[in-house]
Image (tube, rainbow, N blue to C red):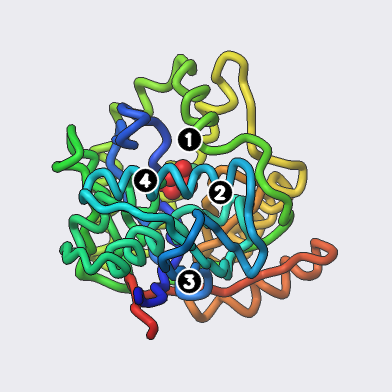
Amino acid sequence: MGKTVRAHTNIALIKYWGKKDALLRLPLMSSLSMTLDRFYTETKVTDSAENRFYLDGIEQKGKNAQRVFSYLSLLQQKFGVSGNLQVESSNHVPTSAGLASSSSAFAALAAAFCDHYEIRVDQRELSRLARLGSGSACRSVYGGFVVWKKGNDHESSFAYPLDHQMDLQLLAIELNQQPKKLPSTNGMKQAQTSPLFNTWLERNQTELEQMIRAIEQDDFTSLGQLAELNANEMHAINLSAQPGFTYFEPATIKAIKLVEQLRKNGIECYYTIDAGPNVKVMTRLKNVKEIINQFVSVFDNVKIVNASFGPGLTYLD
Ligand code: PMV
């Protein structure tokens, strides 16, 4: 029987936002993320009379389940194995609220699938397999800072870890726990109609290299400025798509303004935002308390989770 596998979510500091190949989920750009300790998915795959998918103990039907089963059947074809499967997952992430639950979900599923069938693959191959379920999942195979090299085919598009960590905290400010309205696949497709899209692609390699340098030099200021710029570029192409759209809610703007205000007051912090209204604030450990106090005083009922570096895939039993 296969083991339960835990995979942690990751948040991109240089974002993946655009696909070259929808089926293989090959990206148009390389990306770089931080794996988080506080958010994760645990998944176990077992044999079953029928295909079944349970999330947090509740059987899933419809689109969610369909996505999981077509992914499993893709992997079964790839490895020449067959049979109905039961997937039991528990999600320690607000599902689909821009906190990247699909990254941990498909990394855990890819690993649990291989474990169930005793398919021995290395981490690089696991990252390719996870990518077939959800692009960002390829980065959740590893802990710490992770680069996803865009590559140009299935073989050359995989993630690898960077060998550096630093004093970096990520405060996930949960302004809204509702599932996002526009799934990332649709958002990425729509974004490609922006007249700014080519500029977004042209800048990718330079921004990636600058980010890696900032990490290697423990340069928090450059890391934060660059992550913020990169997120704003992504959201600018959404706003300038035809038709334009945005994941921002009024509370998102309010949070951005608070981060800017905190910086003016000498508390160094930066934001990044994904395919949802929530804001993540990056800071050094010494400023965490003050930033949390400020957010709590400005927002009613805000939930804040203070995360730092999480590990790669963990096999639990
Ligand atoms: O792989 P997906 O479909 O979860 O898309 C991820 C998109 C972003 O979270 C916005 C950026 C990223 O690189 O994780």
The three-letter amino acid code for the residue at tag 1 is Met
The residue where tag 4 is placed is 73
Residue 5: x, y in percent?
39, 73
Q: Earlier in the sequence, mark 2 or mark 4?
A: 2
The residue where tag 2 is placed is 65
191 with respect to 23 (left or right): right
Front residue (pair 196, 89): 89
Residue at the limit of the structure toward the front, as seen here? 49
Front residue (pair 259, 161): 161
Mark 1 Cβ inside 8 Å of ligand 1 = yes
Q: Earlier in the sequence, mark 1 or mark 4?
A: 4
Residue 92: x, y in percent?
58, 70
- Whole-Å distance between the Cαs marked 1 and 3? 30 Å
Q: Earlier in the sequence, mark 3 or mark 4?
A: 3
Residue at the limit of the structure toward the bottom, as seen here? 317
SS class of the residue under badge 3? Answer: strand
The three-letter amino acid code for the residue at tag 4 is Ser
The three-letter amino acid code for the residue at tag 3 is Glu
- Whole-Å distance between the Cαs marked 2 and 4? 12 Å
SS class of the residue under badge 1? Answer: helix
229 with respect to 161 (left or right): right
The residue sitting at 24% across, 70% down in the picture is 164
The residue where tag 3 is placed is 42
The residue where tag 1 is placed is 234
Quadrant placement of the N terminus: bottom left
